[in-house]
Amino acid sequence: MRSGFTCIVGRPNVGKSTLTNALVGQKVAITSDRPQTTRHTIRGIVTKPEGQLILIDTPGVHKPKTLLGERLNALVADTWSEVKAAAWVVVNAVIWAVPSCFTWSVPNATNCAVVNAAI
């Protein structure tokens, strides 16, 4: 059986946790209208006959104004550096480059998909 890790990244309140819950098929991540609800990485497993996908839901990436914000962004960067694929979630837009709010470069994620979470 094949398996792999994929992190779900994006700005705050774009639907990363909602996407994680939908793909897993049950509620594994809290969802809220408030930004920065996710404070830790949350893992969910999608099992199909072809293999397993371990989804890692991450906090929203933003321009930090506090130490907490810096640490949440660092958590996203650390998580992204440990996976081979990433899903970048955006709302009603398509991006072609990593936003300027990133102070780190895209590490090992050799496969990066843009997911447009149209609301």
Image (cartoon, rainbow, N blue to C red):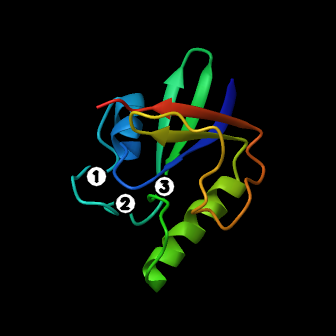
Asked which secondary structure carries label 3, the reply is loop
Pinpoint residue 47: horizontal percent, then vertical percent.
51, 26
Residues marked 2 and 3 touching at CB (< 8 Å): yes
The label shown at residue 5 is none
Residue at image mark 3:
58
Q: State which quadrant residue 105 falls in.
A: bottom right
Name the side, left or right, on which 96 lies relative to 35.
right
Residues marked 1 and 2 touching at CB (< 8 Å): yes
Which mark sits nearer the N-terminus, 1 or 3?
A: 1
- In the image, what residue type sits under mark 2? Thr
- In the image, what residue type sits under mark 3? Thr
Which mark sits nearer the N-terminus, 1 or 2?
A: 1
Name the side, left or right, on which 63 lies relative to 91.
right
Of residue 26 and residue 62, the one placed in the foreground of this image is 62
Asked which secondary structure carries label 2, the reply is loop
The residue shown at (50%, 32%) is 115
Residue at image mark 2:
38
Residue at image mark 1:
30
Which mark sits nearer the N-terminus, 2 or 3?
A: 2
